[in-house]
Image: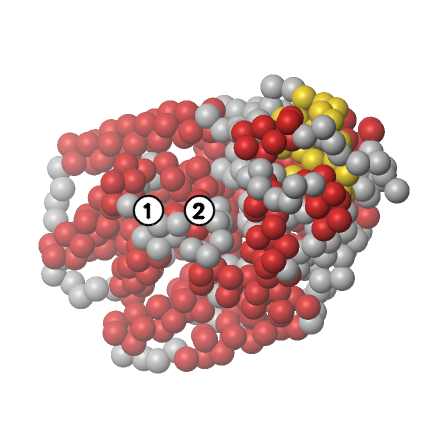
Amino acid sequence: MQKVGNWFYKHPINWRMTQLLVLLLLLFGVIQFSTMGLVDVDAYYHTKMAYLIRTQGFKPEFKWLPFTILNANEYVDHHFLFHVFLVPFTFVGNLVLAGKLGAIVFASLAVWTCGIVLKKENVVGAEFWALAIFASSTGFLYRMSMARSQSLSLVWIMLTILVLFQQRWKWLIAIGWSYVWLYNAFPLIFIVVAIYVIAARITEEKWFWQTLVYAIAGVVIGLVVNPYFPINLAFIYDHFVAKLDIKSISVGMEWYPYDTNQLLKNSLGALAAFVLGAFSWGLSKKSMSLPALFMFGMSLFFGIMVFQSKRFIEYFPPFPVMFAAFAIQPVLQEKKLRWFVFTGAAFLLMVGVGFNLYQSKGDFANSDSPSLFSGSSHWLALNTPKDSIVFQTDWDDFGRLFHFNSNNIYIVGLDPTYLSLANKPLYDEWVDLTQGRGEDDWAAQIKRDFKACYAITDLKHAKFISRADKDPKFLQVYKDDNSAVYKFCKLD
């Protein structure tokens, strides 16, 4: 044991980076446990899927969204590997706690691997810059702290960058393959590799086309050698095409763009780092390095994307910070900076970490209560036949409903486009009904078209609740401070 300890102490890349990982675990732990529940509705779905994989095998039958393109015959787990990685955490028993622990570990690994890339490239103060990523954006911390795939997606991007910089390019096959199994954001590997090829051509006057070949080979293998082949191909097509026209269907807010003021408020540190990197380039007498130009290109790409969709905040902030880290290295070597410069930088880092920690705790504390549908779901599980369909009034309620009650089946979930793609008229009808519109015999319409005899709603759907309360065929059988359940027909 003493030999192992001495080895870690003598190898800073191991000892110091281990300290960094422990610190990140503590910081993300403070954020995560500032609220009782999981901060995102999809996180409830992910933890339940991990539990089902543990208890039923790697491909559990998915029967809970029969009206959508995720029906039992067409279901594709496009977060399959992420769910597998969540499985060990489900042994704690409480699935909400499992999601929290998984989110802490995965978020910490995401930032930590950024530090590993810097350390492997001999960046002075790699640990400092990794913590600067934590201090760069509250939006980034919020997205990273969700029990969702984006944290591990960033890990996979960093692994891609690591093998590119180390020129161990054949590993791109394994990374591409596993990325397809992990998350539908796998096309990002092509962007990463393409930016590397361009940066290498500019700085080293070489075309490293083979990197693209290896990445393509890995992705193709991942698509074909896949637990859900060949239906995964159709799902991927539907999933991406649907996001090209988000104006036609109301999807999650993460798909809509930031405005400048929002980005300045939640990512000022990342934007300041980009300016610092550009300023450092101007001060340096040396030509730009491949890593610096690469990080500049990545910053531009994700900067543009974050103005297209808020969800890209989960990728943008690390790259301006890493760009600054690489760009400033020649300046540190060429100019004799005084002690107060480093002291000031350390002070700003501590202030940034503390402020973002405080702000993120507040953001998490304002999230919805985990009990939002727990009481009504428990009532449905105990009082309705197994596999009976429940009409819900919001698509993003599915995550919690499924988490707390897999006894019943639901109308739409995870993404409203999944119902729209399967049956657009039925989707439009569902939207009308959730707003209290529909035929005169409302109960008969829901039973006829959705095969449901029960409806569940949060208390914010005032139009639906008002009409249900006035309809003599609707009987309110359960209500608490968060939700209500109605029964409106006899079961056949």
Residue at 60% across, 24% down: 482
Residue 12 visible here:
no
| Location of mark 2 (residue) | 254
Amino acid type indicated by mark 1:
Tyr
Q: Residue at x 18, y 54 (%)?
A: 278
Determine which of the numbered discs, if any, sits on residue 485 in the image.
none
**Quadrant in which residue 81 is drawn:** bottom right
Residue 271 visible in rendering: yes
Element at label 1: loop
Q: Nearer the viewer, residue 489 or 452?
A: 489
Q: Amino acid at mark 2?
A: Glu
Percent x, y of residue 150: 50, 49
Residue found at x 64% / y 27%: 470
Disc 2 residue crowd, few under 14, some 14–19, many 20+, Cα 10 Å: few
Q: Residue at x 70, y 35 (%)?
A: 455
Q: Quadrant of the C terminus?
A: top right
Q: Quadrant of the N terminus?
A: top right
